[in-house]
Image (cartoon, rainbow, N blue to C red):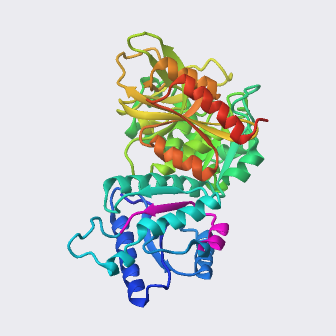
Amino acid sequence: MKNKEAKTIWFVTGSQHLYGEETLLQVRQHGIQIAEGLGQNERIGVHVVFTDVVTGMEEIRKLFQRANTSAGCIGVMVWMHTFSPAKMWINGLKILQKPLLHLHTQFNRDIPWSSIDMDFMNLNQSAHGDREFGFIASRMRIKRKVVVGHWRAASVAKEIDDWARACLGWDDWQGAKFVRFGDNMRQVAVTEGDKVEAEMQFGFSVNTHAVGDLVETVERVSEDEIDALVQTYEESYTVSKALQENGTQRGALRDAAKIELGLSHFLKTGGFKGFTDTFEDLHGLKQLPGIAVQRLMQQGYGFAGEGDWKTAALVRAMKVMATGLSGGNAFMEDYTYHFDPEDSLVLGSHMLEVDPCLASHKPSCEIHPLGIGGKADPVRLVFNVGAGPGLNASLVDMGNRFRLVVNEVEAVEPRHSLPKLPVARVLWKPLPDMETACKAWILAGGAHHTCFSQNISSYILEDFAEIAGIELLTIDQETRISAFKKELMWNETHYGRK
Ligand code: MN
């Protein structure tokens, strides 16, 4: 399903004038056919549109200039049908600011053994034409994704889809605004970071509003709006007795709804794509936003607790990358371990704010005391999360660069009911095994906060890290600690220790 109608990948075919007009016409027709084939392919979540056949330096430079300024263009895919002398690409590549994919394919899948002649050979030259393009991109040190295979192959569509999803997330970050209510949770290190550097590197800005600004918006919420939202809660969730009409804590449910409406208005009015808060700075709010944050995350906003703006931005980007896919992407925290040697598990959760996009059943809406923050009991949604492959991703600031740490995991069905745990929770087994995964994560400096994903693969995040120009460390089935330590050392050399 292609949900992002307005966002497109531009398909550009390279050639030259050496072979005459008739050949160029065929090149164009084939380019259009490939672009249409990819555009209609259900495996690719973003539209691919044929843009042009290019044969000269000025033409290429102008086309890339247009790509840079087109709001709809989120990436450029190039393919050399014939030989396309690559010096003509230099000035274009110098200015291209959109992500680049080099599709190394050819129009025909098979060699037509009985009919092949020199005309066929002169038209179908991708095998060497794409090598010439590869050289200039490498010579210019241009980061790009290279996809190899026949354009109708499922594996090619999958790789293009991975990259196109990374492009969607990247595009969403450009000019995005994230708001922090209050600052960082006191003295926590990993949630800090260089917001100026982040804006330069990633394109999004992070700025603070006093929580009082939010309180003002919350106070303007009308009783009618609260009535309507409380009704939505009742229709969507199993509401616990104390929160039902005439229940002892009905007022707390209305307070929670009021906070959600205020937050929602604030985010919409300010054009924010995500936010953070902290239980240490809630002046004027009756309770720590629980259900409010949970529902806003489900609507697509990025969020992380305790002022963690990097995770909030990552959650947002991963939600956008997952457009049209089933499953969810959610703010998560590695909370506590089950160290049974036969069945090691991580229990992931947060003190309130787990995104119901992960819920495997109708959530229950409950109210329980919260030991920190010194406010009234917060209302929250409680649920379990189903089994399946997933991953955790964490973005940390290493001082001289941002590092994305990814750990592939296998979520498992809950085997116990946890009747006294008043928060939503996920159980997973990290790959390759508990000890190796946790050791590698700790050595990499990965945070306790992550984005837990049910539908974004580490391949998509690999493309995303490459587009963003940041370091990526993946912990998966293949990870061995001795090699991982060397990777950490080599990366220090690559980026330069600070
Ligand atoms: Mn936390």
Q: Which quadrant is the N terminus positioned in?
A: bottom left
Q: For residue 92: magenta?
A: yes
Rendering coords of residue 130 (x, y %): 47, 66
* Residue 307 seen in the figure: yes
Q: Residue at x 40, y 28 (%)?
A: 411
Residue 233 within the magenta-colored segment of the rendering = no
Q: Is residue 439 left or right of residue 445?
A: left
Image coordinates for residue 403, horizontal then vertical, percent: 64, 38
What residue is shown at x 47% (from left), y 44% (from top)?
459
What is the quadrant of the C terminus in the image? Answer: top right
> Residue at left 51%, top 52%?
166
In this view, 230 is above or below 288 = below
In the image, residue 454 above or below residue 419: below
Q: Position of residue 108 (x, y in %)?
A: 30, 69
In this rendering, is residue 188 above or below 99? above
Q: Is residue 405 above or below residue 19?
A: above
Left of 464 or right of it: where is 31?
A: left
Along the line of sight, the residue nearer the viewer: 166 or 129: 129
Specify start and end residues of the magenta stretch as a single range: 89-106
